[in-house]
Amino acid sequence: MLAWTIYITFIGVLVLLLLPRDNARAARIVALLTAIAGCVVALVGAMQQANPGEVTTIVKVTWIPAIGANYYLAADGISLTLVVLTGLAAVTGILFSWNIESRTKEFFAFFLALIGGVYGVFLSFDLLLLFVFYELTIIPKYFLIARWGSTNKEYGAMKLAIYSFVGSHLVLIGLLAAWVVARGQLGHGSLDLIELSHVVFPVAFQHWVFPLVFVGFAILAGMWPFHTWAPTGHVAAPTAGSMLLAGVVMKLGAYGCLRVAMVLFPEGVREWQWAIAALAVAGIIYGAGVALVQQDFKFVIGYSSVSHMGFVLLGLATLNTIGLDGAVLQMFSHGIIAGLLFGVVGRMVYDRTHTRDFAQLEKMNVGKLVPFAAVTFVIAGVASMGLPGFSGFVAEFQVLMGAWQVYPKLTLLSGVGIVVGVAYTLRAVQKGFYADVTAAAPAPDEHPLPAITTPERIGAVLLIAASLVIGLFPSLLLNWIEPCFKSSLFERLLKGGAL
Amino acid sequence: MSNLQYLQLLQLAAPEAIVTVTLLAVLGADLTVLRGKSLVARFNFGALLAVLGCVAAGAVALSRRVTADPFNGFLAVDPASDFIKVAILGLTVFTILISTSGKFTNHVGEYLSLLLLGTIGLMFLVSTVDVLMIFIALEFASLSLYILAAFNKHDAKSSEAALKYFLFGGMSAAFLLFGFSLLYGLSGSTNLLEIARSLAGKSSDPLLLVAIVTTVVGFGFKVAAVPFHLWAPDAYEGAPTPSAAFIGSGSKVASFYVLAKIFTLGFSGAAGSAVWQGYAAGWMPVVAVVAALSMVLGNLTAIVQTSVKRLLAYSAIAHAGYMLLGVVANTAGGAASMMFYVITYAATTIGAFGVVMIVEEATGGDAIENFAGLSRRAPVLSLCLLIFLLSLGGIPPLAGFIAKFFLFSAVVLADGGHLGLLWLVILAIAMSAVSFYYYLLVLKQAFVRDAAATTAIRVPPLTLFALVVLALLVILVGCVPGWLTQFL
């Protein structure tokens, strides 16, 4: 059933392409219906999966026998979590781009193509298939940003595309090498992730191939110092573009690190564990520190994404179940919260005020003009800081617990990042919305900015609700995630871990 | 030769014979029935005849499953070479289809028959294992291609292109003939199999090394590999676009097939090794160096091009570098993946040139800026361009990606699982990341920038049909590669 998330989305793309050119309304409705259908299928399919701890095959047919590639879609709890996240991101992304008027149908066609590719990555258990979907997402990203973006859009889009492409090519080198070595051991070519996870690659081989594949994926996860595409890309992208970039595309990278690099090369992970942890903490602190001094509202959120993704990587580097649980939960949580933050800044504020410069926003007193945006941002901000009750708290807390057992000093250092996180969020709230609390709200008839629309309200409520639900009942997702790390797929990875 | 042998000759050369008859029919029809008709009618009718002939020849080649070599290698037919012929015929068909809207000539009959003549030469080229016949067939095909490049008589650039192509080609032919003569002197035979037999154990013979080098030089010119590539950008830019498409597609398929045959069959005793830190003299290191240079120089130079045709020329040089990797692999798998690569590349290139031709005629030039706003002015055409260029850049799930995957995996595998050739693959993958950038530059114009003129571009239906079919083929082969690999 879950496979239909992919098919429905791509059918939506085809329908959009066939629509008449100037009917923006029809394009919006088709896109929204497609996204809702995909999201519902994702939710229902995820609920139906009886045993989220085990990899459950959805479809497996021979694809290219010569190299051992199958069309192999499957899901375990980690995939389920991220598929549901993708569904949510798709629906809210479309709600927040309801006001796109320029070439609407093409915008949504690229948007849905990106979503379809993302679903595909999260559900692929064949390496070639996963790679195909992974690269498939690059082109829509590029055009979404270059055509519909804002500040420095062509530069930001090209930078993102090249970073993605270089990253995926590093992965490709690793995959080819792994394929050849595994072929020597198995006697036949195989790209089946499950089968390859039981191949014991030579230790020396793992030591050099793991960093290649890991970094290849981690570039997209925003790992410092390969994160520089992230702020420029996020800032250049249209609102829905940044929501997707931060919400799901960065998760693709982290997911690839976990699913491919770490599962296939456990010895490589242990060799480089310290480096990943160190880079993750560097990213947490650097991202937070840089976010603190930005003048552009969107850059604040862009760098905060780098910082929060650092927690995901730190969680991955713990190699114990609690840290890994936290990492996956943080992928979900950050996807929701970052989406919301970008939605507020890009759609609710920038599309109305046409500026993201704090100096200008301070004069405008946006908090009084668009109170809904201000309130939403405050809620998203506290969720992002890691206030208990929101998803971010549960996720980052688990990551830190896991990390404390392995790297206590680094964990302490990452605490600096959390404190700075509070600071930059409060600064953004203050400068962006409440610079002059004494100013009076304008009279309704001379209101300078358009009112908040219904799609925006629905989108914001959906995302806040998702973050709250997971914050209050984390077991909803943890029941999916936790059993995964006890499955045979992760056995070799966790064998040497602390727990 | 007895009568029986003539009959057999006719049977084995049936596809070539059909194309020859078609050629005469096209020429005759254009000179008689079609005389005085409009250019479009002449082109459409001539193309119809030519396409029918090619399809018939292809059907004959595909339906027979014979392996025969009755003339001591001069005409050796087997299913593999028959399939390559079918591929060449297919490429000719698509070239003809995109030519029909061309305004570069009113000598329709001559143009089409030269195209078919070149095709015949290429078909003979792939079904021989005799170096003398290889040389004759190659020159036969090349002479047609030289004229095709010069076909736009009103454009000095076309003449320049043809002259450059001819001078370089002639020189390369001299190199090739010199190399072949050395081979004959060393082995006393012109048959590749016998040459291989008598050369076994002589791999350090200096004369053999000279023969290897001159052969590499000769074919290096033909396939436009660095440092023998200098003619390619000018020829691609100046020649009428369909001619350039044919030079970059059909002739490449045949050249690579023969190149692989000469090296893996004829020079099998003198392979040497291009393995990292395991270098040994022979043809492998020579080809590896040429491949590496082509990939690096082709891709880096393509970045700075402003003309899309020149960009495609440098990208062709880069692709020749990737393809040569398949030769370096020196395995059956390597050769098969190389042919897969060449065929999918050739089909994609014809498509890309077809789009360029239409844009050139509509906007008056082939500069990258002329593609601005194409997605609005010709939506279907721009989608075709997207598919062709992304396939050339190696984006899945298109044919170009899966071809690269096959090729690179075969090369990595070639060293018996020791990853000795991984350095070449790493270089190739790094360079393919570079290539993505310049393909994206063209696509950026088409999809992101707005054009000064917003009028719709009229695309001739036959050309559009050919381009859409090619685009669908590129997607289809990318998604279901087994459909093509079963023949290789």
Image (cartoon, coloured by chain):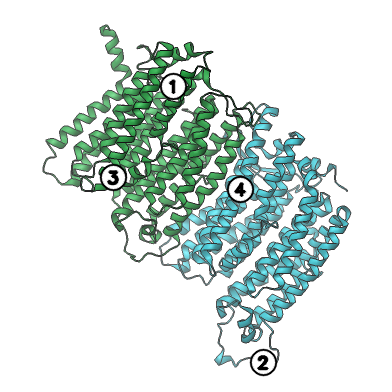
Chain colours: A cyan, B green
What is the x, y in percent for residue A148?
51, 66
- How far apart are labels 3 and 4 at the CA level? 38 Å
The verdict on a common chain for dots 3 and 1 is yes
Which label is found at residue A168? 4
The residue under label 3 is: B240
Marks 4 and 1 on same chain:
no
- Single out the residue that lies furthest toward the front: B206
**Callout 3 secondary element:** loop
**In front: mark 3 or mark 1?**
1
- The residue marked by circle 4 belongs to what chain? A
Q: Residues within 10 Å of mark 4 (few under 14, many from 20)?
A: many
Residue type for callout 2: Ala
Q: Which residue is mark 2?
A: A439
* Residue A223 x/y as whole percent: 70, 56
Quadrant of the image occupied by residue B254: top left
Q: Amino acid at mark 4?
A: Ser
Using the rendered image, report if marks 4 and 2 lie on a common chain. Answer: yes
| Residue at the (60%, 57%) spot, across then down | A38
Question: Circle 1 is placed at which residue position?
Answer: B211
